[in-house]
Image (cartoon, rainbow, N blue to C red):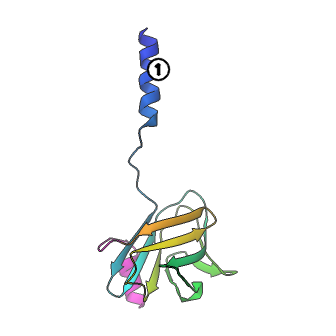
Amino acid sequence: MYDYLLQLLIHLVSLLPLAKEKPYEAFREGGLVVICIYGLSKDLEVEAVDVGGYYLALDSVERVGPAELREGRILIPKKTQAALLLKGAEWADEVKLHTNQGTHKLKIQKHGRCPLLSEAEKNL
């Protein structure tokens, strides 16, 4: 009987959502929207950036870190940190990243922190 209860408890615990850090964060910083991308398990290919229904040209997106524009996509290697800076998008409430891993809808926060942001500000 105790074995059955233990198995049931283990099963129920496995159904609980675990708090894990999201690999994406979007926030406003001055006149920019900053999208931080943290250590994904697979390479990320950003195919399009949708800001309130408007698609930005990927060559207009400032890239910080190992992100590079190649063949019309922004490529970010796995297990790295990168930041995408969107100019003129501070009015938006959300941004969608269309990637090789699906569409990621990000609510733009008023404040945030990105380790690469200080490096990006030096380059602006």
Q: Position of residue 83 (x, y in %)?
A: 46, 75
The magenta stretch spans which residues?
109-124
Outermost residue, left direction? 111
Locate residue 118: give its quadrant.
bottom left
Direction from residue 119 to residue 80 in the image, left or right: right
Q: Position of residue 109 (x, y in %)?
A: 33, 71
Q: Residue at x 61, y 64 (%)?
A: 43
Outermost residue, front direction? 53
**In the depicted structure, whether residue 107 falls above or below residue 87:** above
Q: Is residue 12 magenta?
A: no
Q: Residue at x 54, y 77 (%)?
A: 49
Question: Badge 1: few (under 14), some or many (20 or more) residues near its Cα, within 10 Å?
Answer: few
Outermost residue, top direction? 1
Q: Position of residue 6 (x, y in %)?
A: 42, 18
Residue annotated with mark 1: 7
Q: Which of these two is toward me, 83 or 66? A: 83
Q: Residue at x 38, y 85 (%)?
A: 32
Outermost residue, right direction? 71
Q: Residue at x 67, y 81 (%)?
A: 72
Q: In the rendered structure, which amino acid carries the disc numbered 1?
A: Gln
Locate residue 56: give its quadrant.
bottom right
**In the depicted structure, whether residue 101 falls above or below residue 95:** above
Q: Quadrant of the C terminus?
A: bottom left
Circle 1 sits in a helix, a strand or a loop, which is it? Answer: helix
Locate residue 121: give its quadrant.
bottom left
Count of marks placed on residues: 1
Q: Position of residue 13 (x, y in %)?
A: 41, 32
Q: Quadrant of the N terminus?
A: top left
Q: Which of these two is toward me, 9 or 41? A: 9
